[in-house]
Image (cartoon, helix red, strand yellow):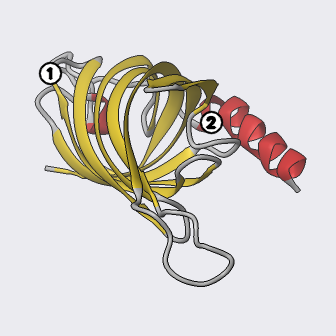
Amino acid sequence: MKKIILALLVASFVAAPLFAATTTTKSSGSPRGPQNLLNMVGIGFTAAPSNPDQGDVSEVSVRWWVSKTVGVEAGLGLGVGDGPGVFLFKGKTVIALKNYQTVNIYFAGTAMIQNMSTPAPQNPLGGGGGASQSTTMFAVGPGFGFEWFVINNLSLSAEAGLRLTVGKGYTRFDMYSGWFPEIGVRFYF
């Protein structure tokens, strides 16, 4: 099942440019529609499914395009589901590599600080376990993604990349959000 989903993801990254028209311009010379991202601010929600160490993490973020090709993003995330308790703050720089009429393909550099709390193991003979454990970790990594503008102000996105995570007695190099990309929706003002 994982191989099928990964194959669909790769196919979607390859096919996205084929379905997008090239950027056209108005007589004023500025791109029309969502390609003119300059000073656009978007509020978004991202779901990162089933990371092996964190469980599912949901994030709310704000993205501001400081130029037509460069954006900065700040986000807060919380662990949801059966995994450990996670709280994270993420900063991201987004660089548009190619802008089509309705699709932007981008590179992203991400830095993240997260605090993960794991419940104490339960005593098999009864009684409670010890105190829960809390660890602060720092992660950095590059990624690639695409943002498809369904309408001028509403976009859907998918992003995948690599991540190096370090903390007290912990080092891991993997893909962010495990084997599946981060999926998001964003509304621009």
Q: Quadrant of residue 74?
A: top left
> Is 45 displayed left or right of 142 in the figure?
left
**Amino acid at circle 2:** Ala
Q: For this view, does 158 lie left or right of residue 62?
A: right
- Residue that carries the numbered disc 2 in the rendered image: 16
Judging depth in this view, the residue of 6 and 57 nearest the camera is: 57
Look at discs 2 and 1 and give the one toward the viewer: 1
Out of 4 and 168, give the one closest to the viewer.
Answer: 168
Q: Tell me the amino acid under the disc marked 1.
A: Val
* Residue 66 image point, x, y percent: 14, 21
* Residue at horizontal 55 percent and vertical 70 percent from the top: 82
Mark 1 Cα-neighbour bin, 10 Å: few <14, some 14–19, many ≥20: some
Q: Position of residue 116 (x, y in %)?
A: 40, 48
Tag 1 residue: 66
User: Which one is nearer the viewer's eye here, 63 or 92?
Assistant: 92
Q: Is residue 82 above or below residue 58?
A: below
Circle nearer the N terminus (2, 1): 2
Position of 72 with respect to 123 (left or right) is left
Left or right placement of residue 66 versus residue 13 in this view = left
Task: Name the residue rendered at 34%, 30% in the picture.
Answer: 112
